[in-house]
Image: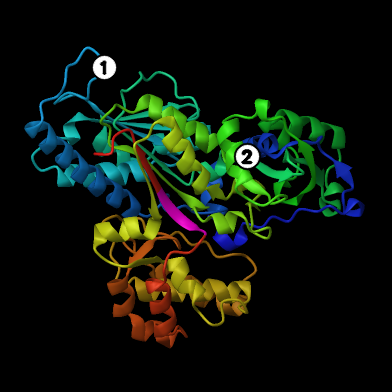
Amino acid sequence: METIEEMNPQVSEDQEILPQLIGEFHPIDAWQRHVNDIFYALRGSRLREYYQTFASADYRLAYALAEDYYRRLRRREQSRRTTPVSDSTSQEIIPQAHGAPLIVMEWGGGNGNLAACFLDRLQALDQEGAFYPRVQYVLIDRVESLLAEAKSNPGLVPHEGHVTIVWGDVEEVQGFAYGSVDRILCNELWSELPTKLMLRKEGDLQEEYVRPNMSEKRLEDIADWPGFVKAFGSKDKEALNGFPDCLDDVIWERGFRKVEAKDLLFRRMVTEFLKGLDEEVLVPVNLGACKTIQEAKRLLSPDAIGLSSFDAGTIDRDVLNDREKPCYSIHGGQFSFLVNLALLQRIARHAGMEAVTVEPQKEFVGRSLNANVMSLMDVLATHPNIQQADSWEMDRLILQTLGVVNRAYQSPYQRGMDYPLPDHIPLDQRDALESLRQSLKPDGVPDTVAYLTEEEVLSVMPDLEGLGYARDSIQAVMMAPPQPVDYSHFFCAPSKES
């Protein structure tokens, strides 16, 4: 999973290092979808080798969502007992009836871990059986390799009959009626959906166009260049597997072109938003995310609990107005965009959502635990030698830190971290690192972005200090105010009472 600091792509405008074109100039959102499709086709089964998400192995975000959903369900049920449900014929749809199915959708469900943990926790909370038996959890993804992982996830087996796994596009969900859904969840999805980069210049709207070039260092490895270009252009997985995997070696050439506002989705909202910023400031316009909000409004019932999306973004207009801000990263060859939460707030309200809020993701998770939280990556980032460490020394520090934190951390799941050691580790260090790796307990921290509580970290602080960490530095991160760009929880619902 990319960090906020990595959202600054290596893009070249130097023609001398653009030896061979792979394709022509197109809007960046068109190439984004094209290249991301190739990324998942070639690397989808090895996704966690390239990045991790807050829901791919950890359970705490899913548990927080289940607890939030259960609390909201109980509150809504209590409200229904005191306020008769209207059956007015003037309404197209009446609120969901008592005992009706509760359709929970997860968009971009990945390997199914969030679904499994969410259902585990909801079932445990619902001792009276008022809600869990009615839940139909629909997991939707357009990446076939990830759907295969979800279908084989053993954590979903206990919930057989409550889970449906569907291949589909979340920007236009098929097969579900208007007003039929109660809850929609998505995690680190919006940053991967089609996004334009736009600016105003001399009163005109312009958008960024890019075209791909192969880096000179990999060009000589591709013997059949015409065949490679054809396979890349058609996203031919079988053909691309016959060539070197060189997504990381694509160099993107940039340019800008005028865009007619009439050709732009949500044109009035986007145009007005950009007028509030300085000219020639490049801004992400997450059109795919906008379309999901519009689709959520169509699918959610009038008294639905609502949509929750978690992603890296900003609601701060000063950040969006900053010419030096990073708008996207290219991580493992895949595009991932900063989410413009300020624009999405406007889109949600325009779509008819009555309740719209944005909060730091850490606050949402911490609220369920009644604790301050931080990720293991946050802990690692405070080490004074983190920037100077060689790669194998970094592996040693991570393994040592995991061993210490695992003394206080115990997961309800047996899915400890799978930490393969890289080949470049010196032979005289490999045995020691392998011993550390083998000592990781199965119910320990599952990955580097797993959430830790303040109590868990501080209880092993003396041992962390023995590794070179400083108590003040860790406590400062734990208590730090929300950052202008951070992982956030975007919530919207049709009703203010949701």
Please tell me whether residue 488 belongs to the stretch shown in magenta: yes
Contact (Cβ within 8 Å) of mark 2 with mark 1: no
Image disc number at residue 36? 2
Q: Residue at x 17, y 35 (%)?
A: 131
- Rendered position, 431 above or below 327: below
Circle 1 is placed at which residue position? 91
Provide residue 190's location: percent of width, then percent of height. 51, 42
Q: Residue at x 29, y 52 (%)?
A: 64
Is 117 placed left or right of 328 in the picture?
left
User: In the image, is residue 366 part of the stretch drawn in magenta?
Assistant: no
Q: Position of residue 181 (x, y in %)?
A: 31, 27
The answer to whether any part of residue 43 appears in the image is no
Kindly state the secondary structure of the residue where label 2 is placed: helix
Q: Nearer the viewer, residue 205 or 484?
A: 205
The residue closer to the viewer here, 443 or 286, is 286
Mark carried by residue 290: none
**Colour setup of the view:** rainbow
Tag count: 2
